[in-house]
Amino acid sequence: MDVVANKLNVESQAIAEEDLVREKRRKPILRPFLKTVAPWLGGLFLLAAAITIVDWALGWHLQVVARAPTVFAAVYVTNLIRYLVAAGGAFLLFYVLLRRTGWLTPIQKKLAETPDMRREIFYSIASLAIFAGVGVLVYLGKVAGILQFYYGGNPLGQFYFWFSVVAMILFHDAWFYWTHRLLHTKVLYSKVHRIHHLSHNPTPWAAFAFHPVEAFVQAIVLPIAAIFLPMHPLTVVFWMLYMTGMNVFGHLGFELFPSWFLRSRFSNWHNTGVHHNMHHRCVSSNYGLYFNLWDQWLGTNHPDYQAEFERVTAGCAESAIEEAD
């Protein structure tokens, strides 16, 4: 276990040194937030205003334009509730209640501090506006007949419904892996994805803490899938529940799976909390979201992933990132 910790110490320190220095200076959160997020949200607002003005000036009075603000608001509020319930509930359970019992060992000994969580919340709430904007695109695509959604009946008793749920999850898993690899290219990492990696030991609040470009890349998967995969609204609900649960779990800071999980071929294909936590520390490995298949197939798992998982699930309190500090 000590060998694993030492190797992770060196790797984590080399990759995260610059970001850690910036974090220790504790610059105000609002300034970088406004520099990275405000231009994109402002652009989204100006685009919506321009479309509305053109519709009014030309006397089109299109229903889709009139309904867009309502759709945006409904999607934003729904996503905000989803975020607060999932991330807030996980934070309350693990960081406030269970943390005091000593039943669970954190993946990293030193948990995130309040400024880190405040930053995660700021960016997550901003990302919800991008998600809502994509929700408007989904509505427009449905009205135009480009996106395939079906209604009526009891979908829970239909084979195709469950097929579509599984297909959506598998498609999103592949989409996430490859777009995640793309976001780790030099330019996109420094300009976009680095914001998410400011959380070296993420909390559940980091679930949607993205740069607006990354938020768009991850949200656009739904309308892309709906072009060729007919979906019932409940398909989207089931997928979002699984997606949100796994996203919060990956940023939880605690491992929930048992020590034998990666030793079994019947379960080692599924990702763990340690998997994504290591990605935040070591950056250049462990890219998968739901499953460990792409990382296994392409050799992008961290070489010490299983050993680190064993360390955490054995109840070892030593943490690579803690020692690196």
Image (cartoon, rainbow, N blue to C red):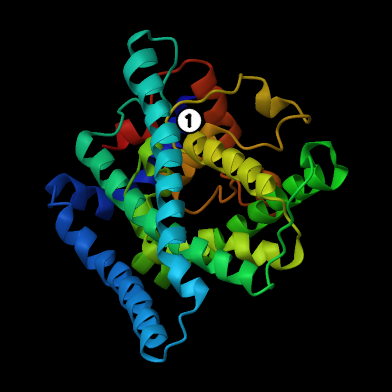
Q: Is mark 1 on a helix, strand or loop?
A: helix
**Which amino acid lies under the numbered mark 1 shown in the image of this protein?**
Val
210 over 161 or under it: above or below: below
In the foreground, 119 or 137:
137
Measuring from the top left, give residue 45's x and y in whole percent: 32, 72
Residue at position x 41%, y 40% in the image: 81
Left or right, 262 with respect to 82, comes to right
**Residue 204 lies in what quarter of the image?**
top left
Expressed as whole percent of the image width and height from the top left, the position of residue 42 reads: 28, 71
**Nearest the eye: 314 or 53:** 53
Above or below — where is 33 with respect to 318? below
Residue drawn at the location 38% of the way across and 36% of the way down: 84
Relative to 297, does residue 83 appear above or below in the rendering?
above
**Which residue is denoted by mark 1 in the rendering?**
3
Does any portion of residue 304 appear in the rendered image? no
Image point (71%, 59%), residue name: 149
